[in-house]
Image: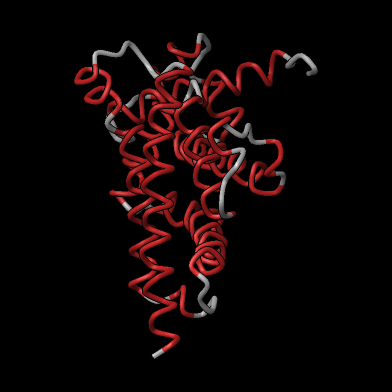
Amino acid sequence: MARQTRSEATRTALIDAAFELFGDKGYAAASTREIASAAGTNIASITYHFGGKAGLRMACAETIVSHMLAQRKAPDQIATPRIAQNAETEFELFMLRQANMLLSLNKAQTMVRFLFRELYEQTEVFEHMYQRFFGPVFDHVSTLWAKAIDIDPEEAQSNENKIRIFSVIAQIAYFRIGQPVVVRHLGWADYDTDETEQILRVLQTNIRALIAAYRTTSSHRTTQ
């Protein structure tokens, strides 16, 4: 991998610092002075690279979107956890890959804190992320769900099926959002390889059980 130029390194440092401070304190409370200090640079660099604080906020959002879209376009570049190598459906494989990435990504904790603040505030940053990433990816996941339980793709767009999909996403998300609670209660120090595999094993069981339950339901409905 090519080394970053000094300008690129400064830009990256500012985004990393913004993730941390926007996530911890919120956009309004995090000052440009704090962000620049945490990044080891000066305030003027925020204006130079991003046009200001609002531009830096959008750059954080785009960093998440770009990272996820790159992996969506090249799914084979996402590490496949050992437990998912014999996945029974594309839906299971997709979910376990995403879960493994989310649990293993060093920067995930700060990114997730930033992301959820933006989701709850529903600003233009949220709208940007929804239009660029969440909406299209959820449509893709709905297609995988339709194949997994053998229903028409249009039926997978029903609210009932969307909620089923969200129930899987929620399980995955909690293990990252609630990591401090999980590791405290289980006596872990962090999510290392063994701990991540234990989580993935449970998720895999739950995903397969959900698919089996609704595949049976859809098959029964078809034969009636």
Quadrant where the image shows the N terminus: top right
Considering depth in this image, is 219 or 71 the residue closer to the camera?
219
For the point 49% across and 55% down, the residue is 134
Residue 32 relative to residue 87: left or right: left
Q: State the image coordinates of residue 76 (x, y, percent, origin top left).
A: 71, 40
Can you name the residue that lies furthest to the right here? Answer: 2
Q: How many marks?
A: 0
Considering depth in this image, is 137 or 19 the residue closer to the camera?
137
For the point 34% across and 30% down, the residue is 23
Residue 210 relative to residue 86: left or right: left
Q: State the image coordinates of residue 13 (x, y, percent, origin top left).
A: 55, 18
Can you name the residue that lies furthest to the bottom here? Answer: 224
Establish if 139 lies above or below 28.
below
Quadrant where the image shows the C terminus: bottom left
Considering depth in this image, is 31 or 130 the residue closer to the camera?
130
Q: State the image coordinates of residue 117 (x, y, percent, origin top left).
A: 31, 41
Establish if 134 lies above or below 17.
below
For the point 45% across and 74% down, the residue is 157
Q: State the image coordinates of residue 210 (x, y, percent, origin top left).
A: 37, 57
Establish if 161 lies above or below 30.
below
Quarter assignment of residue 213:
bottom left
